[in-house]
Image: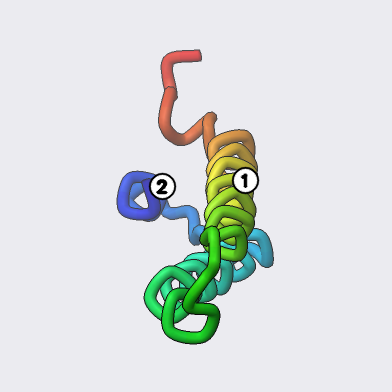
Amino acid sequence: MRMIVGSKGKVVAAESSGKIKTFSQIVFVISALTEDLIFPDCTYIISYITLAFMTLMTVISGVIYFRRYYEYLMPDR
């Protein structure tokens, strides 16, 4: 999407929601890889919570970008 919009002369600025999404992805990967080491008898609740938050932030970030740059993706409308 960034390349399509950029080819039309518009700069796609980084959004804070995208930065939070990236951070939540990093936190999820770290928790998924280390939760069993830190809490041997765990039920992976931390991984599930961070997965849910990561998924939510991915959807929110995507919606924000599509709403902001939709006109550049569908020029016929």
Say which residue appears at 53% left-offset and 31% top-offset. Answer: 70
Residue 36 vs 38, above or below: the answer is above
The one nearer the camera, 23 or 72, is 23
- Residue 13 visible (yes or no): no
Pointer 1 with pointer 2, Cβ within 8 A = no
Q: Residue furthest bottom?
A: 38
Residue 56 found in image quarter? top right
Q: What secondary structure is found at the residue carrying circle 2?
A: helix
Q: Position of residue 7 (x, y in %)?
A: 32, 51
| Quarter residue 43 falls in | bottom right
Residue at 51%, 85% in the rendered image: 38
Q: Tell me if residue 2 comes above or below residue 59 in the rendering.
A: below
Q: Is residue 74 visible?
A: yes
Residue 62 x %, y %: 54, 43
Residue at the front extreme, as displayed:
41
Where disc 1 sits, the SS reads helix
In three-dimensional space, the C-alpha distance between marks 1 and 2, rounded to whole angstroms, equals 24 Å
Task: Rate crowding at label 1 as few (under 14), some (14 to 19) or many (20 or more) other CA atoms within 10 Å.
Answer: some
N-term-proximal mark, 1 vs 2: 2
Query: Which residue corresponds to mark 2?
Result: 5
Disc tally is 2
Residue 35, percent from left and from top: 49, 76
Instruction: Say which of 12 and 60 sits in front.
Output: 60
Label placed on residue 36: none
Residue at which label 1 appears: 56
Query: Which of the 4 image quadrants contains residue 29?
Result: bottom left
Q: Residue at x 42, y 15 (%)?
A: 76
Amino acid of disc 2: Val
Indicate which label's residue lies in the foreground, 1 or 2.
Answer: 1
Left or right, 32 with respect to 42, comes to: left
